[in-house]
Amino acid sequence: MGVGVTPGSLSVAAWQDLQGADLVYAPRSQVSGSSVALAMLAGLDLDPARVREVLFLMDGDDARIETHYRTLAQEIAGELRAGRTVAYLTIGDSMTYSTYGYLLAQLRAVMPDSVRVTHPGITSYATAASLTEFSLGEEKERTLILPCPDDMDALRRDLLTHDVVAVMKIGHRFPAVLALLQELNLTEHATLASRLGLPEQRLLPTLTHLPTDLTRPGYLSVLLVRTPKERRFT
């Protein structure tokens, strides 16, 4: 089963299935000492003996990604064939820019008859919108959700052709993104959230006056921008 975990938001059904799972796979990045997804469950009574931390891979190399998740799917299929139930944690929503999507595709290939259940979670942009009172869409506004591109010209087009844009996974691109927002006079219409649900969580309702210590908000960050009508292309 796939379980989307979000700070303070875990459905009753998802928690019941987690409690009943024989194994809980918790993905973590190569640069992290622990699983962020697992940290989202801090304070809940999840038996650590049932947890397996596994590295997740999203390096842009399609062949490597396929091999990585095919290997993990084969391991999980072995557990399922042995009669064990398996859960896979993922940050936010299980099916939105999630490593679970790669795993699910490979599991369907190696064990098509497996019984699969996916529990949704709350996306980072929805959480950020709620915490900062940023409406993600009003009346006929068009909302675009995308991972931050390296090409700032592409992001410029997206900002100028949509009403609301949610930019995920900003990381090292933040200085370039900020420069673009300043050029387009959109800093007062932009909201930034990073590390949601973690001790170092940060919320900036506007980017007009930035804290001096903010240089790179990190990979786990999301930017919400509303472009005024008079500045948009139609």
Image (tube, grey):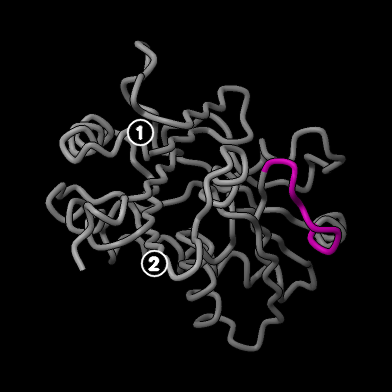
Residue 35 in sight: no
Disc 1 target residue: 188
Marks 2 & 1, CB-CB < 8 Å contact: no
Residue 140: percent from the left, percent from the top? Answer: 44, 70
Residue 201, image quadrant: top right
State whether the magenta stretch is mostly helix, strand or loop. Answer: loop
Quadrant in the picture for the C terminus: bottom left
Residue at the spot 42% in from the left edge and 65% down from the top edge: 141
Q: Say which element carries label 1.
A: helix
Determine which of the numbered discs, if any, sits on residue 88 in the image: none
Q: Is residue 223 left or right of residue 228?
A: right
Quadrant in the picture for the N terminus: bottom right
Look at the image and give the residue range highlighted in magenta: 7-14
Residue at the spot 35% in from the left edge and 33% down from the top edge: 188
What amino acid is found at the position of numbered circle 2 in the picture?
Answer: Arg
Residue 118: percent from the left, percent from the top? Answer: 67, 70
Residue 218, image quadrant: top left
Disc 2 target residue: 142
